[in-house]
Amino acid sequence: MSLTADVKAELIGVRDPRPSVRIAELTSLLRFAGGLHSIANRVAVEAEVDSDPLARRVARDLMEIYGVRPELVHVQGSGGRGNGHFAVRVIEGGETLARQTGLLDQRRRPVRGLPNKLTTGSRPDLAAVWRGAFLAAGALSDPGRSASLEITCPSGEAAMALVGAAHRIGIAAKAREVRGVPRVVVREGEAIRTALAHMGAERAAAEWDQMRQRREVRAGVNRLVNFDDANLRRSAQAAVAACARVERALEILGADVPEHLREAGELRLAHRDASLDELGHHADPPLTKDAVAGRIRRLLAMADKKAEADGIPGTESAVPAGVQE
């Protein structure tokens, strides 16, 4: 299975019993998976999804929440490519459903973005909006320079509404247009992990983050091999060693690490190639490079002291062989 399929499989299993959360997820999914159509001069609600389990989940939610019985249709892929897609349609009672979900306003006009009640909801509601949007039209790429979590949007207004919901729950997302198609994109590795966790894909978030860290370590080693400049090589070695020691320090201290020292350590790990000065700019509020360096030194010293007292390997034991600080 692809990363995207893995995430969707996990999200299909997320079942929050709160009515407002279920409505937010279902409405978002309907909006991003197709929305409204006119069939025989009647308003129909239709969602096109990429798997049978998701189609059945949508149909079940429609029946349980709104009491409508949708039609399920398997649309074969063209040219022998893929397994096609699955359409969930509500024709009889479609206009009533569209009004109930907020996809139609009081004047029978389609809502171009998302219903206002969704984008101003609680944090669980906003997370459900993202879960529904990803199930409908999301994609996750492999970790690396071009890593991204993207959601294809039916309109620019829908993209902006999704970005607004993201910012309210701490997801760093941006709206952009690719070949005329609106998209919402999450780029930074930590932001992608946060987005997956907020949506409810905790397992996928942890696995994706492990893949990202392994690739960063390999990239760091490759840079060591390819650097021609001795100063750059030394800087790279120091960065690899520092990150290895910080990871070991956080592991040794666990829940006992002071919050400000934890933040400094996590800042070092989130921006592995950044200078101390750059790390200071990434902090919130910003710190001087001396303040960042001091906190990291105290973190390592505290961890080494505890390791010595517990009779376990200290932070330097985590530095890869052949890498000098």
Image (cartoon, rainbow, N blue to C red):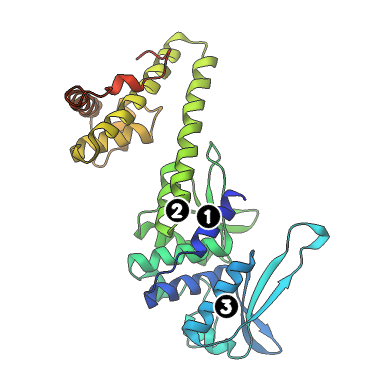
Q: Nearer the viewer, residue 218 or 271?
A: 218
Q: Residue at 39% x, 65% y: name it.
A: 126
State the residue lying farthest toward the right.
79
Category of crowding for the residue at label 1, using alpha-carbon neighbours closer than 10 angstroms: few (below 14), some (14–19), many (at least 20): many
Say which of 209 and 291 sits in front: 209
- The residue indicated by pointer 2 is 196
Query: Which of 14/298 is in front?
Result: 14
Residue 188: tell me if it is visible. no
Amino acid found under the numbered disc labelled 2 = Leu
Residue type at numbered disc 1: Val
Residue 260 locus on image (x, y percent): 20, 38
Under circle 2, the secondary element is helix
Point out the residue furthest to the front here: 311
Query: Image check: 151 left or right of 23?
Result: right
Residue 124, image x and y in percent? Answer: 36, 66
Give how far apart the Cα atoms at labels 3 and 2 are.
Answer: 24 Å
**Disc number at residue 7?**
1
Horizontal relation, residue 200 to residue 62: left or right = left
Q: Which residue is mark 3?
A: 59
Q: Do callouts 3 and 2 mark residues in contact (Cβ within 8 Å)?
A: no
Residue 104 screen position, x and y as percent = 52, 82
Rendering quarter of residue 56? bottom right
In the rendered structure, which amino acid carries the disc numbered 3?
Ala
Q: Please, which residue is most extreme toward the top here?
A: 230
Per the model, the C-alpha gap separating discs 1 and 3 is 20 Å
